[in-house]
Amino acid sequence: MANGQWYPPEWPDRIRALAAGELTPATPRRAATVMLLRDTGTPGATGITGDTGTPGPQVHMLRRRTSMPFAGGAYAYPGGGVDPRDDDRHVRWAGPPRTAWATRLGLDEATAQAVVCAAVRETYEEAGVLLAGPTPDTVIADTTGDDWEADRTALVARDLSFAEFLDRRGLVLRSDLLGAWARWITPEFEPRRYDTFFFVAALPEGQRTRNASTEADRTVWISPRQATEGYDRGELLMMPPTIATLRQLSGCATAAAALAAAPDRDLAPVLARARIEDGELVLSWPGHEEFTKHIPTGDAP
């Protein structure tokens, strides 16, 4: 491949089946993912290429295990699907009210809360970083220890709801530490589909990331520029939403600048389109021409 674009070999056949009316699109599941940022001045901030001198913040990324059925081997951000219990009205909450988040995300209040909860919960489950504090203007500084790990494991297993976790710990979710950045929907021909909201957040002072995910075999801190260069060289495999958001982050000088830019970001969903044109299958993502693929109708990619 010329770059690191994730492109499963079964896509052409699935696209043809969709065009022929032989494939019924799966309903996308609500999901959230977080681009966790830290400035390069953070103590110990080194990326996979030692890019401490690269201007701008670094982003925390994980590499999905090659055995994963979806995007195996691809670099991504911590994230995952909404837990049906995430719309519980008893979630302890700080920051913009649910009505404001509903307006920003284009969802009803309950669903907006569920998406924000998923963003915070998944970041804790997969990176060990918790955007919550004992008061509306503080953030927990230490989430290490056997008791914390037991709660994290219970969250992953869905034995414990996020609302129950916050109540048990006497914590409030800090929704003000998140900025909504983008929204991408998995193409209709994919068997596993997600309606994913991308958020930005800064690593809270005192907290440290770790590879807490069973789905990842590696985690890194890397500047968006270094990550995009690795993708362009074909060294880092990524899905279109990941590389697109990395390119957008490249213009932010600090983590705070990225958060400040978030309210003006367009959250219109990006959904791939497939069409037959001049004897070719054309796969495109509106507004992101670099991902367009032209596939001869009778050939594999």
Image (spheres, rainbow, N blue to C red):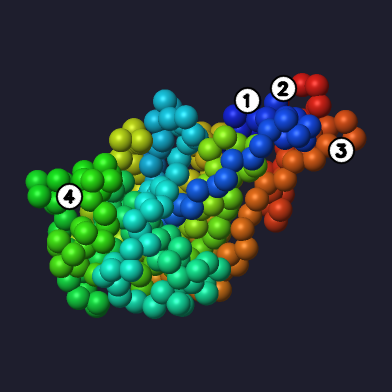
Tag 4: amino acid: Asp
Apparent side of residue 15 relative to residue 231 in the rendered image (left or right): right
Task: Name the mark nearer the viewer: 4 or 1.
Answer: 4
Q: Residue at x 59, y 29 (%)?
A: 8
Characterize the local packing of mark 1: few (<14), some (14-19) or many (20 or more) Cα atoms within 10 angstroms: few
Q: Position of residue 103 (x, y in %)?
A: 52, 74
What residue did someone put label 1 on? 9
What residue did someone put label 4 on? 151
Q: Which mark is first along the chain, 3 or 4?
A: 4
Q: Residue at x 43, y 30 (%)?
A: 68
Q: Which mark is first along the chain, 2 or 1?
A: 1
Characterize the local packing of mark 3: few (<14), some (14-19) or many (20 or more) Cα atoms within 10 angstroms: few
Q: Secondary structure at mark 3?
A: strand
Q: CA distance from mark 2 to mark 3?
A: 16 Å
Q: Is residue 261 above or below residue 236?
A: below
Q: Which mark is first along the chain, 3 or 2?
A: 3
Q: CA distance from mark 4 to mark 2?
A: 46 Å
Check whether the beta carbons of the residues at disc 4 and disc 2 lie within 8 A of each other: no
Q: Nearer the viewer, residue 241 or 101?
A: 101
Q: Residue at x 68, y 33 (%)?
A: 23
Q: Secondary structure at mark 2?
A: loop
Q: Which mark is first along the chain, 3 or 1?
A: 1
What residue did someone put label 3 on? 277
Q: Secondary structure at mark 4?
A: helix
Check whether the beta carbons of the residues at disc 1 and disc 2 lie within 8 A of each other: yes
Query: Number of numbered discs present?
Result: 4
What residue did someone put label 2 on? 300
Q: Is residue 297 above or below residue 40?
A: above
